Structure formats: C-alpha cells, structure tokens
Amino acid sequence: MAVRRVGVVLTAVGVAAALALTGCSSTTESTADSAAPYHQQQSGQDDVAAAPEAGGGPGAGQPAAGAPVRFRIDERAIIYTGSITVRVDDVERAAGRATAIATGAGGFVGVDKRTSDDRRSTASLELRIPANRFGQVVDDLARLGDQEQRDISTQDVTEEALDLDARLASQRARVESGRQLLARATNLTELVMLESELAKREADLASLEAKKRRLDDLTALSTITLVLLGPEAERDGEELGFVQGLKGGWEMFVTSLLVLLTIVGALLPWLIVLGLPVAALVWLLRRRNRRPPVEPATVTAPPRS
C-alpha cells in the first residue's frame, strides 16, 4: 500500500514538472517566434525601423540593440473618438442625413436619442465609423448646419496591441502543449491533473482573445457623438445668470408646493376622523360655559306690625 502511494506521488510530481518545463519552453519559444514576425510585418515592409545615423558601418540600416522600434502613422493602432454639436433648421432631416453619411462611410448608428419640441427639438447620435474615414465624416457632419462645438481625441495603443499579440501566441502554445500531454496521459491521476491545468490555460486564452477583439473593434471603428440642436434649442449648461436662477427658483417653489400639498393630502383623512369629534366636544363645552348662572332664591322677612 505504501509503495502504491509513493508511486502516485512520484507520478504527480513528474506531471507537474513536465507542465512547468513545457510551459516555460513554449512561452520562451513562442514569444520569440511570434513577436518577431509581427514586428517584421509592421516594420520591415515600409522601412519603419529607426533610420541609421550618417556614416554607415557594420550593422548600418539595423536598429541598435535596445533601441525602440518606430512605426509610421498609418501603421500604428490608434483609437479615435470625437464629439460635435451642430445647430440645424430641421433636426429630423439632419439626423436622417447624418445616418446616411455614417452608413455611406461603411459605419452604422449605435445610439439614437431624439426629443421633439418644434423649434427646440434635439437629437443625439453615436456613430461608429471606420478609422480611415474618421476625419472626412466629421467634416461632413459639420456641414449639416452651424457647428458650435467640436472635440477630437486620440489614444495610441500600439504597444498594448503588440504585447497582447505576443501573450496570445504564448498562451496558444501553452494550450497546445497541455493538449499533447493530456493525450499521452497513462493513468487517472495524470488525467485529472492535466485536465484541470488545460481548463485553466484555455480560460486564460479566452480572456486574452476577448481583450483582443475589443481592442480591434475600438481601433477599426471610431466613435463620433453627434448632437443636433433645433433653432431655439439650448445646449447643456448654456443658461446662465438671472434666467437660470429664475428658472431654478421657480422649479424649487413648485417642488416645495407639491411636497406641501402631498403632506396635507396625507393628513386630511386623520383631520376628518379625529378633528370633527374634538371640534364638537369643544363647541359643547363652550356652550355650557356660556349659560347664565342660576341665582339663589332670596327670602323676604314679613313686615313688622
């Protein structure tokens, strides 16, 4: 019995050592083999590596060891976001034209919120546009009416994308090595340990792939928030000074009045049920107190003879 237990322990130790060695070797090899082609694909085709200094010499044309790799603008992973506010004569018609501009550029409308109030109508549209058409679409939207506000921002995620690609390649290699070890399992103990380890590696891989899809979506499709205002519509925070104070004070007055009426309405049934008997009792007591007091009878002495 003791020999069998020792055998199980040795088997478990051997499987753990094999997993560790396989994971380390696959991580090193896959990182080196997968990261290099990506850099070559990004930098080797269009001379994106840093240009050598004048003078040449051995190794000229190659970046120095440890030197950062530079990429052209059109090869970087950049997230574009923007917002634009335009005042138009007809909000509904302008919203339809904005939708046509977005779909014509290969994008779509993600969010569409509108309010109808004649000349005070407003609309807020979130447009997803291909990154290479971002600038042109923003200019087309500005021409829908009178542009009142524009805010454009960018986020460079090139390094994050490179790191994520390398981690994905490494994790895929670890999953494949785990599957190979699982196929060669010879007993139940190895099978259980390898299945648990493989499930963990596959879960990590799925998480990395989800992050990659999200990043690809953000870099491939830019986000533009378009706000359309009718001729007399007001922007958020536009009212200032006396008008804003008067409006705020009136709203507070109406709110306070509604609260007061609500309280009176809640107390009215109690006033009717309890107040009427109390009022009747008070009235009776007051009426009783107002009765004239009864004067005692006086006895007159008979006249003396």
Image (cartoon, grey):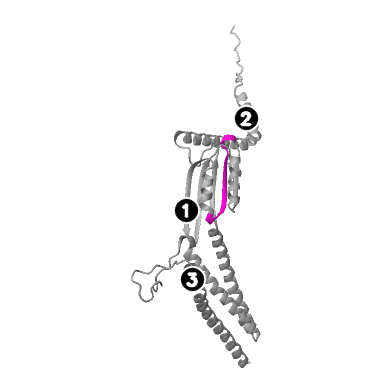
- Identify the residue at image location x=52%, y=69%: 165
Q: Where is residue 24 in the image (x, y as percent from the top left)?
A: 51, 80
For the residues labelled 3 and 1, the Cα–Cα distance comes to 29 Å
Residue 230, picture quadrant = top right
Question: Is 128 part of what is drawn in magenta?
Answer: yes
Which stretch appears magenta? 118-132
For the residues labelled 2 and 3, the Cα–Cα distance comes to 97 Å
Q: Residue furthest left?
A: 55
- Compared to residue 44, the image places residue 272 above or below, namely above
Residue occupied by mark 2:
279
Q: Nearer the viewer, residue 215 or 254?
A: 215
Q: Is label 2 or label 1 in front?
A: 1
Q: Which quarter of the rendered picture does the C terminus lie within?
A: top right
Question: Considering the numbered disc 2 on the image, is that residue within a helix, a strand or a loop?
Answer: helix
Q: Residue 250 carries which label?
A: none
Q: Are marks 2 and 3 in contact (CB under 8 Å)?
A: no
